[in-house]
């Protein structure tokens, strides 16, 4: 498959919101009705603090219908894993509840940051959220001792079987340079997770990171889009397939989406994909240069 870029669809420059001064990182979706989706994202205020908000987007008309006037989730209490910022990563609707798996930011003294996974739950279709736990739902272990367990994508496979693909740090080269890949955790309820250190997407030679998985199950195949980086600040989109969601084979040449033309806003970086299927077509929400500083971009699967 190939992609047709729609371009920048949401930017802080279009709105005069106190909580959203810059960025539009890690877009992820919740279907409302018809062609209308609620797109959650991480915006930053004038103090560069990350918070989660949303805009309602019509996929057919390619227009924003509504935007949250205030964030739906703000940083946690002082000293908690998410006291310096929160970023949306994945949403799942379970009956009348919406589970938001998010990233909690915390500065560190000996390394640049800590990025851990949290869970918040909404009873009103994402207009507001309450934390399920004040602590991260993923834990540091002997196999995963570093505080980067982040960017989860969660899928409910069946009633008592859930998969989470997430970014996991393998080592810090220096205080500003972590190396990480994508691992798998399992759960029976979407809240408590078993981490066995199973790697889904391995680093290739000279790669620093693979990040932000997004998974669809289609025709008996798990399909994952993610981003990978060799040079800092130059993410590209990767792609992999699996028959069981556990063992994956990278097929990056099938990603078929690349950086844009000069001055497009995604000419240096294309990152953090979130792929959905709607009425038979795939849509990819993603970020461009500077890790999403300009806002949210969209690409549409090309029709044959």
Image: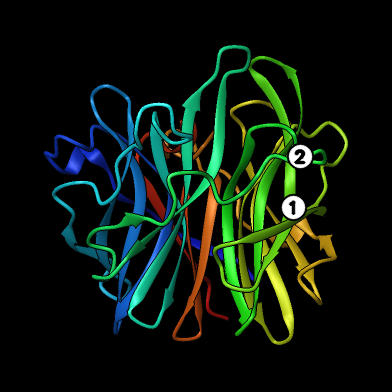
- Where 135 falls versus 192 (above or below)? above
User: In which image quadrant can residue 232 be found?
Assistant: top right
Label 1, secondary structure: give it.
strand
Residue 63: mark in rendering:
none
In percent of width and height, residue 189 lies at: 57, 72
Task: Please state if 93 lies on the left or on the right of 200 as rendered.
Answer: left
The image shows a total of numbered marks equal to 2
Rendering colour mode: rainbow
User: In which image quadrant can residue 34 be found?
Assistant: bottom left
Q: According to the image, label 2 marks what residue? A: 144
Q: Is residue 88 visible?
A: yes
Task: Please state if 266 lies on the left or on the right of 16 as rendered.
Answer: right
Identify which residue is drawn at 67% across, 63% down: 224
In percent of width and height, residue 287 lies at: 46, 45
In percent of width and height, residue 229 lies at: 69, 36
Q: CA distance from mark 1 to mark 2?
A: 10 Å
Identify which residue is drawn at 66% across, 46% down: 167
Q: Residues within 10 Å of mark 1 (few under 14, many from 20)?
A: many
Labels 1, 2: front one = 2
Q: Is residue 288 visible?
A: no
Identify which residue is drawn at 70% across, 31% down: 146
User: In which image quadrant can residue 294 be found?
Assistant: top left
Identify which residue is drawn at 25% across, 72% down: 61
Q: According to the image, label 1 marks what residue? A: 183
Quadrant where the image shows the N terminus: bottom right
Q: Pick whichever of labels 1 and 2 is earlier in the sequence.
A: 2
Contact (Cβ within 8 Å) of mark 1 with mark 2: yes
């Amino acid at each position: 498959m190939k992609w047709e870029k729609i371009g920048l669809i949401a930017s802080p420059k279009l709105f005069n919101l106190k909580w959203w001064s810059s960025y539009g990182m890690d877009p992820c979706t919740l279907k409302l009705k018809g062609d209308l989706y609620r797109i959650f994202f991480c915006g930053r205020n004038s103090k560069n603090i990350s918070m989660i908000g949303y805009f309602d987007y019509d996929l057919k008309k390619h227009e924003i219908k509504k935007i949250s006037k205030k964030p739906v989730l703000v940083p946690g209490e002082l000293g908690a894993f998410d006291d310096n910022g929160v970023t949306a990563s994945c949403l799942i609707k379970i009956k009348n509840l919406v589970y938001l798996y998010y990233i909690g930011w915390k500065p560190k003294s000996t390394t640049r940051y800590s990025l851990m996974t949290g869970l918040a739950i909404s009873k009103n279709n994402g207009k507001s959220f309450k934390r399920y736990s004040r602590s991260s739902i993923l834990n540091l272990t002997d196999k995963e001792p570093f505080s980067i367990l982040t960017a989860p994508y969660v899928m409910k496979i069946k009633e008592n079987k859930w998969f989470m693909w997430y970014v996991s740090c393998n080592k810090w080269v220096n205080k500003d340079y972590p190396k990480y890949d994508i691992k798998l955790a399992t759960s029976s309820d979407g809240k408590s997770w078993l981490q066995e250190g199973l790697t889904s997407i391995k680093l290739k030679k000279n790669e620093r990171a693979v990040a932000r998985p997004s998974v669809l199950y289609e025709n008996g195949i798990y399909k994952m889009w993610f981003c990978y980086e060799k040079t800092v600040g130059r993410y590209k989109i990767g792609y992999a397939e699996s028959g069981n969601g556990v063992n994956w084979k990278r097929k990056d040449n099938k990603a078929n989406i690349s950086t844009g033309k000069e001055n497009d806003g995604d000419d240096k970086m294309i990152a953090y994909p979130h792929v959905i299927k709607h009425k038979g077509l795939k849509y990819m929400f993603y970020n461009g240069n500077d890790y999403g500083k300009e806002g949210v971009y969209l690409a549409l699967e090309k029709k044959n």
